[in-house]
Amino acid sequence: MPRTRSVAGSTLEINRRSALAAAAAVTVSAGVGYALRPTDSRAATGTGTEAAGAPVAQSRRAPAAPLAPYTRGTTLSSVATPRTSSGYRRLGDGPGWKRRVRGELAAPKTGRAGRRTTLAAFVQLTDMHLIDAQHPMRLEYLRSTDVHAWRPHEALTVHGAVSLVERVNALRGAPVTGAPLHFAMTTGDNTDNNARTELEWFLTVMSGGRITPNSGDPRRYEGVQNSGLKQYWQPDASVRDADKQLGFPHLEGFLTAAVRELNSPGLNLPWYSTVGNHDAMPLGCYGHGDSWLAEYAVGGKKLMSLSASEAKKLQDAITNGKDPKGTAFRDLLKAHTRDMRSVTPDEKRAPYTATDYLKAHLDPAYRGVGPVGHGYSSANVDAGTQYYSFRIADDVIGISLDTTDPGGHYNGSIGTAQLRWLDRTLRDNKDSYAVVFSHHTSKSMTNTRPDPARPGERRHNGKEVVALLGSHANVLAWVNGHIHRNDITPHSAPDGRSFWEISTASHVDYPQLARVIELVDNKDGTLSLFTTCVESTAPHRTDFADLSQTGLAALYRELSFNAPGARTDLAGESKDRNTELLLRKG
């Protein structure tokens, strides 16, 4: 297929794309068109028609001269590393991670660095899990059976997310090519409890503004961390809790600082949004519809402790998908009404629906630098869909999938209508390269329970999606999250067609990363995808006396590293971090 233009070739090229975006002049594929606003994306309607007028992603203004490749501010330069070997381990500056060349799908050819031209460059953020840490629906009490079921740093997720936004804003372009970054994509689990509080915080983090990461009593924190219960870290209290016995510090004023107002600058480049299971369902695993649970979420009672045996039973039911509607969960809570503690009710903690999620993204208050809806459009609202396509550059399109299953459970799948739409979109854009985004990985798309809104529609697993993507020569990458681990997998079809699946670690569990991805044409019959991991701007070293916004963001990382029971393999192997991924040109 002919490829004639580079994304970041010149200032003229960037300005041309911006002008096209402003005029909504680029049509992704044929079909019945909707009169969309200039920055609306082409949303799937689910009716067999599609909205024309998808924008070219608006890049940063191109620099006067090409930027040089760089490593500063990336994990190529330095990575947070423990300075001590036992107990509570303090972090400091450590050596960076080297770049690995992976040639499973195409052999690297000499001299390609001098020939390459950039097709696109963007940032992936995933699994930020902004947590309303005082929410009654939280499952902290599962810690009695699984120590990692509650994390000591959960009250600082907003601080960590703002620091990650600051890192993206500080990047000087794409690390390898120096090309301007064209957009950022969040690949789901932006929130944690499917709570309106969290959705508001997420959208403000991304678009900019003041955030008070508190709910319930506006004057103070009310939750497990000032409960006096020894199974949780009690940072302000003298109680010798289980985490302090492991070396966690006593930090006077921590909780007051954690719920204090802070400011996010918002991303300084366009951002798009993909939905995850925690965005779609309460606790990321229970389908909507139980009125008792909805009332419990906003009410004045909160369960904070549970026996290990009951916790194990609940955790097993969630893991095995035995209670998709939360019926057994509701019954358990009812049985422990007398064990609950009083908290301040808050209507803002209410669960939000898929329609609420879409309308919030379309709210002008959260536009930031755009685009309007951050990928979603009024067509999505009308059709009840959360998938869409958008144009990244003249010869690259992006496709955002909805892999959540509203029927319940945290693993995913997609329905037949969406699978057909994906196939059609790739066929209609066969002369453009394609990057596909989703929350779930191919291996975690194993939940084919019917969608309650479409009970007669078949659901399709990850193997079927891999097969479909492999049947299209224009697919370069499938970018996702969900597993909280860096993992890069080559996929090849018998006829030689191939693509890379790029899964990135979360920003709630250590090592708390995002990823820059660059697409280049090597002008030798091959393409390269460069992946570079980045941390937040928070310093690697922490100061227990520093409870400022920056100091708390640094603590967020160090606490996550020390979280009891936390996995130590989430950074992945070196081949899953900073890479050059080769492909044969289709």
Image: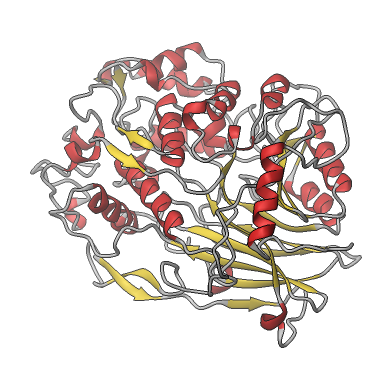
The answer to which of 168 and 469 lies nearer the viewer is: 168
**Is 159 on the left-hand or right-hand side of 519?**
left
Provide residue 372's location: percent of width, then percent of height. Answer: 59, 33
Q: Look at the image and tell me whether residue 229 can be seen.
A: no
Q: Residue furthest bottom?
A: 110
Establish if 176 lies above or below 192: below
Q: Is residue 234 above or below residue 347?
A: below
Residue 26 point in image, percent of width and height: 77, 42
Judge from the rendering whether residue 123 lies leftward or rightward of residue 81; answer left or right.
right
Left or right: 409 as drawn, with respect to 145: right
Position of residue 55 in the picture relative to residue 171 (left or right): right
- Viewer-side residue, 340 vs 135: 135
Which residue corresponds to the image point at 35% horizontal and 24% vertical from the top-left? 136
For the residue pair 196 and 335, the one nearer the viewer reads as 196
Total numbered labels: 0
Residue depicted at x 41% and y 57%: 167
Whether residue 456 can be seen here: yes
Q: Residue 18, position in %: x, y? A: 65, 47
Which quarter of the rendered picture does the C terminus lie within?
bottom right
Query: In the figure, residue 54 lies in which quadrant?
Result: top right
Q: Position of residue 221 (x, y in %)?
A: 21, 30
Residue lying at the far left in this picture: please name it.
Answer: 238
* Image quarter of the N terminus: bottom right
Q: Which quadrant of the structure image shows residue 399?
A: top right
Residue at position x 88%, y 63% from top?
2
